[in-house]
Amino acid sequence: MKWDNIMTGFALWLICHTNIQAQCSIETTAFAPGEIIRYNAYYNWGFIWLHAGEVEFNVTEQIYDGRKVFHLYAYGATYKSYDWIFKVRERYRSYVDVETQTPLWYERDVTEGNYTAFEEYKFDYERGQIHTYVQKREKPAKNGTLPLTPCLFDVMSAVYYFRSVDFSHYRDGDKIPIHMILDSKVYHLYIRYLGKETIKTRDKKEYKCIKCAIQLVEGTLFKGDTDALIWVTDDDNKVPVIVEAQILVGSVKAILTETVGLKH
């Protein structure tokens, strides 16, 4: 259950090019330090849905490189009793500027079955570069640089940027381009706005939601040219409630279970 693909579904981007950092800025309207959001993860095997793991997101405020930042953190894992199906241990961290929400630093540390990877990105806006450090499986670590193109997000910064976007500007079926760095590659993806819908979760809670379809990145578990579905609350918090994605065999789903410290 590759959470970077699920989290890709939370990402959005709207801005054009002049100054890279200034033009990508957005007012932080949907979240604040102290917020915690938890999910149960399910794997569909034939006609059976297995409660196979959990995911948690949280936000704190810290100082990075002498400036105030949001520390965005997410951790996802399968339960040990289901590791024999497909073991997942994934951790994501990102520092974003408090005022603009532009990414400054990102780290990804994952285990997916027999696959392991560690990535670190530092966003250098003065030089227009991303400094990368990547180590996969037992291969030697690699340092490198990539061009820092306008409004380029890592997975975590994209998740929270998306939550501050005003969807009232879109009509059913509109495609919204997103640009994201993952595995030291830049992907040009899209989110399709699908309107509004009222849904119920497994615990019978009802939510009025905004519905979107998200193009996935092909990986160890997901096929290319497929979309995930995501429902976020149609309110000022824009909390993702359900995310569904087809995988090579079956499907996965993340369902909201708990929120703490919501801004609104």
Image (cartoon, rainbow, N blue to C red):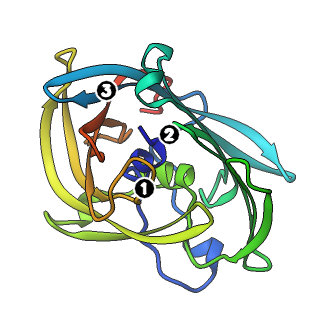
Residue 92: horizontal and vertical position, in percent? 61, 41
Q: Which mark is residue 31?
A: 2
**Which residue occupies 15% across, 54% down?**
195
Amino acid type assigned to the residue bearing label 1 in the image: Ala
Query: Quick check: marks 3 and 2 in contact, CB under 8 Å?
Result: no
Name the one closer to the observer, 135 or 8: 135
Residue 89: horizontal and vertical position, in percent? 56, 31
**Which residue occupies 79% across, 80% down?**
127
**Which residue occupies 39% across, 50% down?**
10
Left or right of 145? Residue 165 is left
Dot 1 falls on a residue whose secondary structure is loop
Badge 3 or badge 2: first in the primary sequence: 2
Distance from the alpha carbon under mark 3 to that under mark 1: 21 Å
Amino acid type assigned to the residue bearing label 3 in the image: Tyr
Q: Quadrant of the N terminus?
A: top left
Structural crowding at the residue carrying mark 1, measured as other residues with C-alpha within 10 Å and reported as few (<14), some (14–19) or many (≥20): many
Eyeballing the image, is 163 above or below 40? below
Structural crowding at the residue carrying mark 2, measured as other residues with C-alpha within 10 Å and reported as few (<14), some (14–19) or many (≥20): many
Amino acid type assigned to the residue bearing label 2 in the image: Phe
Q: Which mark is residue 42?
A: 3
Structural crowding at the residue carrying mark 3, measured as other residues with C-alpha within 10 Å and reported as few (<14), some (14–19) or many (≥20): many
Eyeballing the image, is 191 above or below 62? below
Q: Which mark is residue 11?
A: 1
Name the one closer to the observer, 28 or 161: 161
